[in-house]
């Protein structure tokens, strides 16, 4: 048997020194972000109560590359560069001639890609004298990452955790508290937004949109002591995640390959963008022709069934309005949806790429995602977080197409986190408690009728 290499490691000296900013290469600029009250384009001053100026400037920057501060790079070294692996055992099990590679972001201290942006966000806030950060968390991964980052920089941290997760994931909550953050079940009585939702529906199980409203309000009314941090969706967040794809480019070069297909799961779009944008750049500027596929849940099909329109970023309407593929700000996921990726909208950058047909999108029913996750676990030995199983389902489908056609395509995907804190979801799947759920068109139509008029 040939001594085949399946693990591609970069030395620490190869850790990227810059993030890649796709705004420099987009064929047309991103649509402006609008003020939720006036519906006028917002400027840096409007965002200043929520974010430090360095991040606001990154949000609108057209510079192709932005330097990663030394202190951030030092912290990245705790786990970066992350490994690229060839899924040789999965290939064999599928009997496919395709070469399947995955970038493994589950090696970070928080267990997912989220720390790639949590650390620079905490860094820039600290540098501008902020005392603490507020945020929301759904499945709990973002709250974990931000609480690690704030503890590194000596910042306080207030996490509004979607109530159903708070109740169902006590260990996630305990991890966040271990890093010193305060965690509140959302909707909470702590904010005007939360009290309003509870008055309408005392049994509300919460949603990401509601938790964002609470966290934004808490920062905006703190008199400058606190600012707000978002774990996905925003341009600067997607830019921080490009370290994933930049490393993968070099590692595939070590393997002597270039991808025909790049796949990522998409909730708000950050890990997908992280692996995909450096390859989108090659498509745009170097004549490469890689297919790039974003995978989302059939229960939350923002790209594949949503409408490209201005909508609020949160449920109450405090956050800026963004043009995005949206299911409407009142979207609440079905309670038996176990796969994460529950945000009603999608990152503006991902939406523009999709609208310009520079990327593809697919919606996957949850039973298919868990089936793929279990197959991956049994061949590669890693239990994936439920989110990346959406990508894995697509990778398996593409690899089986290669089996039929005999094509030896190179497929790369982002294994953006491990599933060690999501075993209740696997348990529900294995005991037959999960069902498929397609988000009903009637709900979408209703939400579209309620979109803000611009
Ligand atoms: C948060 C999270 C996601 C969804 O967020 P994106 O911004 O779409 O990446 C996906 N996978 C994991 C493991 C996460 O923690």
Image: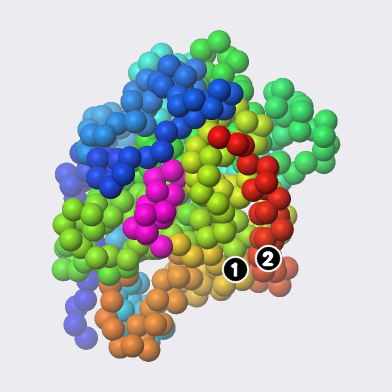
Residue closer to the observer: 224 or 316: 316
Q: Is residue 349 magenta?
A: yes
> Disc 1 designates what residue?
365
Residue 377: tell me if it is visible. no
**Does residue 87 appear left or right of residue 174 in this picture?**
left
Residue count near mark 1 (Cα–Cα under 10 Å), binned few <14, some 14–19, many ≥20? many
**Does residue 382 appear left or right of residue 29 in this picture?**
right
Q: First in sequence: mark 2 or mark 1? A: 1
**Does residue 170 appear left or right of residue 32 in this picture?**
right
> Disc 2 designates what residue?
437
Residue closer to the observer: 32 or 317: 32
Q: Is residue 35 magenta?
A: no
Residue 187: tell me if it is visible. yes
Indicate whether 73 appears above or below 104.
Answer: above
Indicate whether 244 appears above or below 44.
Answer: below
Q: Is label 1 in a helix, a strand or a loop? A: loop
**Residue at figure coordinates x 47%, y 19% from the top left:** 46
Q: Position of residue 18 (x, y in %)?
A: 22, 38
């Amino acid at each position: 048997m040939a001594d085949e290499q399946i693990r591609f490691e970069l030395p620490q000296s190869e850790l990227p020194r810059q993030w890649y900013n796709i705004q420099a290469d987009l064929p047309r600029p991103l649509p402006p972000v609008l003020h939720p009250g006036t519906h006028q384009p917002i400027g840096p001053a409007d965002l200043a109560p929520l974010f430090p100026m360095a991040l606001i400037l990154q949000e609108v920057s057209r510079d192709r590359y932005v330097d990663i501060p030394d202190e951030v790079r030092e912290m990245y070294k705790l786990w970066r560069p992350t490994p690229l692996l060839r899924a040789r055992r999965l290939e064999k099990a599928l009997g496919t001639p395709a070469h399947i590679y995955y970038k493994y972001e589950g090696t970070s201290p928080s267990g997912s890609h989220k720390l790639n942006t949590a650390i620079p966000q905490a860094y820039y806030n600290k540098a501008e004298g902020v005392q603490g950060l507020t945020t929301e968390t759904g499945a709990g991964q973002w709250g974990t990452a931000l609480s690690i980052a704030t503890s590194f920089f000596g910042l306080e941290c207030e996490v509004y955790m979607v109530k159903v997760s708070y109740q169902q994931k006590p260990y996630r909550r305990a991890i966040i508290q271990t890093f010193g953050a305060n965690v509140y079940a959302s909707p909470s009585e702590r904010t005007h937004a939360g009290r309003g939702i509870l008055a309408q529906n005392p049994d509300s199980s919460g949603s990401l949109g509601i938790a964002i409203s609470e966290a934004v309000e808490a920062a905006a009314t703190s008199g400058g002591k606190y600012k707000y941090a978002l774990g996905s969706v925003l341009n600067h967040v997607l830019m921080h995640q490009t370290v994933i794809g930049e490393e993968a480019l070099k590692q595939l070069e070590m393997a002597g390959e270039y991808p025909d297909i790049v796949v990522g799961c998409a909730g708000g779009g950050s890990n997908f963008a992280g692996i995909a944008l450096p390859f989108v750049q090659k498509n745009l500027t170097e004549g490469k022709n890689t297919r790039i596929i974003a995978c989302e849940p059939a229960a939350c099909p923002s790209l594949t069934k949503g409408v490209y329109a201005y909508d609020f970023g949160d449920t109450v309407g405090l956050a800026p309005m963004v043009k995005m593929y949206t299911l409407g700000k009142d979207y609440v996921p079905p309670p038996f949806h176990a796969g994460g990726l529950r945000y009603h909208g999608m990152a503006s950058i991902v939406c523009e790429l999709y609208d310009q047909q520079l990327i593809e999108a697919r919606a996957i029913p949850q039973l298919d995602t868990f089936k793929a996750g279990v197959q991956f676990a049994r061949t590669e030995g890693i239990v994936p977080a439920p989110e990346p199983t959406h990508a894995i389902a697509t990778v398996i489908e593409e690899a089986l197409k290669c089996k039929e056609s005999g094509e030896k395509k190179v497929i790369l995907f982002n294994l953006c986190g491990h599933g060690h804190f999501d075993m209740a979801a696997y348990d529900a799947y294995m005991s037959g408690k999960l069902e498929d759920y397609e988000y009903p068109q009637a709900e979408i139509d209703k939400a579209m009728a309620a979109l803000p008029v611009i």
